[in-house]
Amino acid sequence: MKTFFASKMLCIGLVVTMLSVGCSPAEKPTEPKTLTVAISPDIPPYVLDKATSGLEVDLMKIAFSEYELSFVQLPYEELEKAVPEKKAEVSAGVRQEHENQFDSNDFIGFSNVAIAKKSANIKIEKIADLAPYEVLTWQNAYLDLGGEFEKMYAPAGPDRAKYKEVADQKIQVEDFWKSDNAVIVIDQNIFNHFSESLGHSLDDVQVFDLFPAVTNFKVAFADEKLCIEFNNRIRQLCKNGEYQKLLDKYQVQLPETPCDEAKGEN
C-alpha cells in the first residue's frame, strides 16, 4: 500500500513539475549587438550597392560577424571625423589621427595613379609635371599622396587653382572622360570599374606611376577594445587566406596588401 501511494505521489510531482516548467516565462532571445559604421560612398569594387557588398564592406562584416552592422555612407572628408563627432562608432577608411578615437592597423590599400587620355598626348614623369593640367582627385587627396603633392595642392599651394576635389568618385571619373586634357588621380581598380561601366575603353588612357605603390587606410573606433579585436580578426583573415579570397572575389589587384605587413610582424 505504501509503495502504491509513494508511486502515485511521484507521478503527481512529475506532472506538477512539467506544468510549472511549461508555464514559466520564455527567455527572451538575445538581441544582436549593433555597431554604426561610417563608410565611403559607393566606390566599386571596394564599396558596392549602397554599402551592401564590396571588399571593405565584406571585411567589416566578417571581422564583426557577431554584430549587426548599420552602414552610414559619408563623403571622405566627413569619414575622417565621424568617430570624434559621434556620427558613428566605427569609421572605415581613415588616415588622419584625431583625439577621442582609436585607429586600427592598416586594413585596406589603394593603388593610386595618375591617368590621362592618350589623345591628350600628355607626358608626366614626376609629380611636378602635373602643374599645367587640371587634376581631378577625391576629397583631401593632398593629405594622402606625399609631401610634394601636398605642397603643390594644399589650400594655400601654388597649383591649387587647377586642383579639383570630387566627393563622389563616379562623378570624378565622369568628369575625366568629359575633359580633353584633365589628369585624374585615383585608385586604378576604381577607375577601371567605373570607366568600363560607363562604356569607355581602358586602351584609350595612359597610366603614370607617380605615387607610393599602395596608400593604406585604417579603421577608427570609439572603443579601444573593439579596435584591438578588429586588428586580431584582420590578422586572422590574413593567416587563413580569407583576405586573399576577398581580393580575388572582387578582382582587386594590389602590389602589396596589409597582409604583407602582418607577415612582417610575425
Image: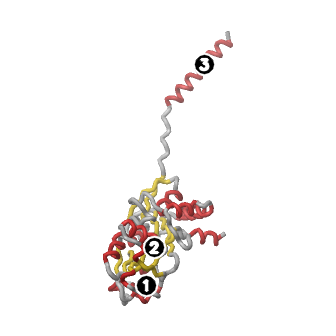
Instruction: Give the label, 2 or 1, closer to the camera.
Output: 2
The tag on residue 80 is none
Instruction: Give the label, 3 or 1, closer to the camera.
Output: 1
Dot 2 corresponds to which residue? 188
Sequence-first disc among 3 and 1: 3
Q: Position of residue 181 (x, y in %)?
A: 34, 82
Instruction: Give the label, 2 or 3, closer to the camera.
Output: 2
Check disc 3 and report its element: helix, strand or loop.
Answer: helix
Dot 1 corresponds to which residue? 150
- Within-10-Å neighbours for mark 3: few <14, some 14–19, many 20+: few
Check disc 1 and report its element: helix, strand or loop.
Answer: helix
- Asked if marks 3 and 1 touch (Cβ < 8 Å), the reply is no
Residue drawn at 35 percent across, 81 percent down: 182
Residue 98 shown left or right of residue 239 in the figure: left
Sequence-first disc among 2 and 1: 1
Check disc 2 and report its element: helix, strand or loop.
Answer: helix
Label 3 amino acid? Cys
Task: Between residue 127 and residue 107, name the one nearer to us.
Answer: 127
Label 2 amino acid? Gln
Give the number of callouts.
Answer: 3
Which residue is the extreme one toward the left?
A: 178
Label 1 amino acid? Glu
Task: Between residue 49 and residue 84, name the one nearer to us.
Answer: 49
Quadrant of the snapshot with the N terminus: top right
The tag on residue 11 is 3
- To which quarter of the image does residue 150 belong? bottom left
How far apart are the alpha carbons under marks 2 and 1? 20 Å
Quadrant of the snapshot with the C terminus: bottom right
- To which quarter of the image does residue 7 belong? top right
